[in-house]
C-alpha cells in the first residue's frame, strides 16, 4: 500500500479546480502550482497551499518536471495528480515521481510509454486481438516502405504522427499521388510538435463516429469499464461535444466494445483511469484508434450517468486499494451531454482568442454542471489552452439533456473576448445532432465558412444598446464624471432633444437610432420608421430587467470602452460601437485633427481660439444633448487653425466644429 494524505495537482485551470475539489472533499491536503500569469487564478485561491513554479510560458513552468518535483518537496506532497495535458502522459515524469518516493496518480511509466506511441500501441492491440484499422505501423520509416504500404492499403488513407495527437501530424490522403507531399508535411509537423517524425498509416474510415470507453484498473489486476462516450462532433480533430450514452449504442455493441477496451487495458497491466478510443462505422464495426492514459476532459458525462467520482477513484486505486466497484454494479442512468466553451474565433477557422473576462456568469439550473477555472476580470492569455469551461447537462433522456444544455448556454454570459458559445448552441439545435446522427464529418457537412461568420447585431440588441449607452452617459454627467470646461455651469431643463447613436462600421450598413427620454426610466427609440417603447424595471452592474414594447425580459450587458456596449439577448451576444462617440481624428493613428460633432445638440462651450496650441487629449469643446455633456477632445497635438461653430449653436451630427493642424 502507498498511503498518502496530501496531493499536489500539477496542472491549472478547470481540471486543477476539479481535482482540488475532490481532494478536499476526500480529506486530502490539496496543493496547487502556478505560473506568474496564474497568481490569482481560482485553482490557486482554493488550494490549501500554492507554489509559484515559474513564468507564464509552459516550458518554464507547468512542463518543467524539476520545478513540479521541487514544489512537491517544498510542501511535503506525498502524491501528484497530473490532470490532463502537460505532464499527464509523460512516462519519464511518472518514473521520476516514483524514483523520489512520490505517488504518481496514474498508470505505470511502462503503460504510458506503450500507449504514447501509436505504432507500438497498435502492435500491442493486434497481439491482444483488439479490432484495429488496417494500416502500416512497422519500424521502417523510409518513404519507400510507406509508399509501398499505401499502395497496398489503398486510398483514402490517414497519415498520422505515431507520437502525438490533437490532429497535429495528421493528413487525409484521398489520392495516392498526394502521398509524398503528405508524408513530408506530416513528418515535419510531427517532429516539431512531438520531437519524433515517426508515422503510421491507416485506412481512412469515412464518416465514422468517435466512440470511447472509460476503463479503470487497479494494482490487483482488476479492470472494468464505465460505458461509452460519443465524441464525434469535432473541429480540427479536437472534440467539441461529448455525450453518454452513444445515441446508436446497443447492449450487444456496448458489451463487445467494453470487452475490447478492458482487454486493451489488461494487456498493459493498466492501473487508474484511462480511455480506449474507437472509430465506429455505419455497420457497427469498431476499430481501435488510441488509448489515452489519463483522465479525459469529457469525464464529467460519465460521472453524471454512473454517479461515480472518477477522480476519487483515482486516489483510491493509486494507494493500492482494489476497485470498490464491480462491472456488474455499473449502470448508466439517463443521458449527459458536455460542450467545451473555448476562447476562439469560430469565423476565423476556430483560431484561439485572448482577452479579459469583463463579465462572467456561468449557468445554473436543474441537471447543470459547470467545470471552470475562471474569475470575472481574469485575463485569458495566449500561453495556455483556450478552453475556458465545460458545461454539462444531465436529463432523464437525451432530448431533455440537450434542451437543458441549450438553455444553459443561452444563459451563460462571457463578455470581453470571442468564444464559441453561440456556435455550440447552433450545433445542439441542428436537426442531425438532435436526431443523434452526428459523425466526425458533422461540422464540415453542416457549416460553410460563411455560416461560421459572426451574425450582425439584431435591431432589438441595437435598441437596448443605445438606451444603455444613453443611461451611462447621463449617469456620468450627473455624477460629474465628465470634466467641465472653464465657465460652464451646471445644466438643467427638459430633455427634449433626441440623442443620436450610429452602430456599424465603414464596411457595412449602419443603424441610426434616436433615443428620447419620455419619463422616469422610460424611453422612446426611433429606428427608421419604427418607434419602440422601453421601460427600465431594475438594473444592476451587468444585468437589466426591462420592458420593450410590453415584453419583459432580462438582459446581460457590459460597457467595455468608450462608445461600446455589449448586449446579450435570447442567448445571442453582440458588441456595438457608437460611431458618433468618436471624432474623425479617432479614425487613424495620430488623428486627422478634424473635430466633428458626434451627435445632434447644443454647443455649450469652446475652450480654445484660433492660433492656440493644444495637446493630444486636451478638451477643446463641450456639447449637450438631453442633459448629457460630451467632451470633444483633440486627437493630435498642434495649432487650432479654424473654428466653424459658435457657443449656443444647435449643430447636427457630423458638423465640423474646429480644425487642428497637427505637428509634424
Image: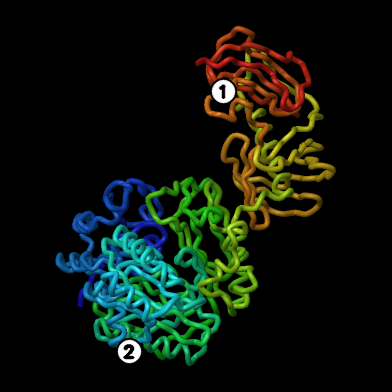
Tag 2 near tag 1, CB within 8 Å: no
Q: Locate the N terminus by quadrant.
A: bottom left
The residue closer to the viewer here, 647 or 482, is 647
| Color scheme of the displayed model | rainbow
Q: Residue at x 56, y 60 (%)?
A: 363
x, y percent for residue 334: 55, 80
x, y percent for residue 490: 70, 20
Q: Of helix, strand and loop, which one carries label 1?
A: loop
Report the residue marked by disc 2: 129
x, y percent for residue 437: 58, 77
Q: In this view of the protein, can residue 556 be seen by the observer?
A: yes
Number of numbered discs visible in the structure rendering: 2
Q: Marks 2 and 1: which is nearer the front?
A: 2
Q: Is residue 59 left or right of residue 481?
A: left
What is the number of the mark on residue 619? Answer: none
Q: Is residue 124 left or right of residue 660?
A: left
Vertical placement of 214 versus 340: above or below? Answer: below
Q: In this view of the protein, can residue 307 be seen by the observer?
A: no
Q: Residue furthest bottom?
A: 252
Vertical placement of 607 versus 183: above or below? Answer: above
Q: Residue at x 50, y 71 (%)?
A: 242
The quarter of the picture where residue 152 lies is: bottom left
Report the residue marked by disc 1: 635
Q: How many residues crowd mark 2 within 10 Å: few (<14), some (14–19), many (20+)?
A: few
Q: Is residue 468 left or right of residue 522?
A: left
Q: Residue furthest right?
A: 529
x, y percent for residue 568: 64, 51
The residue closer to the viewer here, 417 or 591, is 591
Q: Of helix, strand and loop, which one carries label 2?
A: loop
Q: CA distance from mark 2 to mark 1?
A: 73 Å
The earlier-in-sequence mark between 2 and 1 is 2
Amino acid at each position: 500500500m502507498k498511503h498518502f494524505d496530501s496531493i499536489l495537482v500539477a496542472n491549472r485551470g478547470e481540471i486543477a479546480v476539479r481535482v482540488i475539489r475532490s481532494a478536499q472533499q476526500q480529506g486530502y491536503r490539496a496543493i496547487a502550482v502556478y505560473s506568474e500569469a496564474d497568481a490569482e487564478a481560482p485553482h490557486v485561491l482554493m488550494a490549501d497551499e500554492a507554489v509559484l513554479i515559474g513564468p507564464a510560458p509552459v516550458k518554464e513552468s507547468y512542463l518543467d518536471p524539476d520545478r513540479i518535483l521541487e514544489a512537491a518537496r517544498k510542501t511535503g506532497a506525498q502524491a501528484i495528480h497530473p490532470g490532463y495535458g502537460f505532464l499527464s502522459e509523460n512516462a519519464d515524469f511518472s518514473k521520476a515521481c516514483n524514483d523520489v518516493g512520490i505517488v504518481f496518480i496514474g498508470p505505470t511509466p511502462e503503460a504510458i510509454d506503450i500507449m504514447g506511441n501509436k505504432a507500438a500501441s497498435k502492435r500491442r492491440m493486434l497481439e491482444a486481438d483488439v479490432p484495429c484499422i488496417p494500416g502500416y505501423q512497422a519500424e521502417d520509416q523510409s518513404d519507400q516502405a510507406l509508399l509501398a504500404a499505401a499502395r497496398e492499403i489503398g486510398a483514402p488513407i490517414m497519415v498520422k504522427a505515431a507520437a502525438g495527437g490533437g490532429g497535429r501530424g495528421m493528413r487525409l490522403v484521398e489520392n495516392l499521388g498526394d502521398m509524398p507531399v503528405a508524408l513530408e508535411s506530416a513528418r515535419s509537423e510531427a517532429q516539431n510538435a512531438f520531437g519524433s517524425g515517426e508515422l503510421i498509416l491507416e485506412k481512412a474510415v469515412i464518416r465514422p463516429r468517435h466512440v470511447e470507453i472509460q476503463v479503470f484498473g487497479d494494482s490487483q489486476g482488476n479492470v472494468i469499464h464505465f460505458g461509452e462516450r460519443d465524441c464525434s462532433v469535432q473541429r480540427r480533430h479536437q472534440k467539441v461535444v461529448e455525450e453518454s450514452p452513444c445515441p446508436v449504442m446497443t447492449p450487444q455493441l456496448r458489451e463487445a466494445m467494453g470487452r475490447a477496451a478492458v482487454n486493451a487495458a489488461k494487456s498493459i497491466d493498466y492501473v487508474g483511469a484511462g480511455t480506449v478510443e474507437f472509430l465506429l462505422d455505419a455497420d457497427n464495426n469498431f476499430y481501435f484508434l488510441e488509448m489515452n492514459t489519463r483522465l479525459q476532459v469529457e469525464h464529467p458525462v460519465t460521472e453524471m450517468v454512473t454517479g461515480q467520482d472518477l477522480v476519487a477513484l483515482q486516489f483510491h486505486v493509486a494507494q493500492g486499494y482494489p476497485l470498490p466497484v464491480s462491472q456488474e454494479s455499473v449502470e448508466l442512468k439517463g443521458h449527459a451531454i458536455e460542450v467545451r466553451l473555448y476562447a476562439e474565433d469560430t469565423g476565423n477557422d476556430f483560431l484561439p482568442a485572448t482577452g479579459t473576462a469583463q463579465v462572467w456568469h456561468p449557468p445554473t439550473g436543474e441537471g447543470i454542471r459547470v467545470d471552470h477555472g475562471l474569475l470575472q476580470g481574469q485575463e485569458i492569455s495566449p500561453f495556455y489552452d483556450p478552453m475556458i469551461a465545460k458545461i454539462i447537462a444531465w436529463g432523464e433522456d437525451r432530448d431533455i439533456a440537450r434542451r437543458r444544455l441549450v438553455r444553459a448556454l443561452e444563459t451563460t454570459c462571457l463578455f470581453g473576448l470571442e468564444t464559441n458559445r453561440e456556435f455550440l448552441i447552433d450545433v445542439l439545435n441542428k436537426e442531425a445532432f438532435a436526431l443523434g446522427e452526428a459523425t466526425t464529418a458533422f461540422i464540415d457537412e453542416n457549416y460553410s465558412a460563411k455560416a461560421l461568420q459572426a451574425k450582425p447585431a439584431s435591431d432589438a440588441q441595437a435598441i437596448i444598446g443605445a438606451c444603455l449607452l444613453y443611461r451611462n452617459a447621463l449617469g456620468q454627467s450627473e455624477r460629474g464624471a465628465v470634466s467641465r470646461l472653464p465657465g460652464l455651469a451646471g445644466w438643467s431643463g427638459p430633455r427634449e432633444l433626441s440623442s443620436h447613436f450610429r452602430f456599424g462600421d465603414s464596411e457595412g450598413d449602419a443603424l441610426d437610432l434616436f433615443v428620447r427620454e419620455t419619463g422616469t426610466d422610460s424611453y422612446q427609440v426611433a429606428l427608421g420608421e419604427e418607434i419602440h417603447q422601453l421601460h427600465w424595471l431594475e438594473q444592476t452592474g451587468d444585468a437589466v430587467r426591462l420592458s420593450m414594447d410590453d415584453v419583459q425580459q432580462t438582459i446581460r450587458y457590459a460597457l467595455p470602452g468608450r462608445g461600446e456596449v455589449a448586449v446579450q439577448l435570447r442567448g445571442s451576444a453582440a458588441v456595438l460601437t457608437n460611431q458618433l462617440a468618436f471624432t474623425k481624428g479617432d479614425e487613424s493613428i495620430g488623428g486627422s485633427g478634424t473635430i466633428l460633432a458626434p451627435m445632434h445638440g447644443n454647443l455649450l462651450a469652446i475652450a480654445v481660439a484660433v492660433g492656440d496650441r493644444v495637446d493630444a487629449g486636451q478638451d477643446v469643446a463641450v456639447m449637450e444633448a438631453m442633459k448629457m455633456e460630451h467632451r470633444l477632445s483633440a486627437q493630435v497635438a498642434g495649432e487650432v487653425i479654424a473654428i466653424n461653430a459658435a457657443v449656443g449653436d444647435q449643430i447636427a451630427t457630423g458638423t465640423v466644429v474646429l480644425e487642428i493642424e497637427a505637428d509634424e
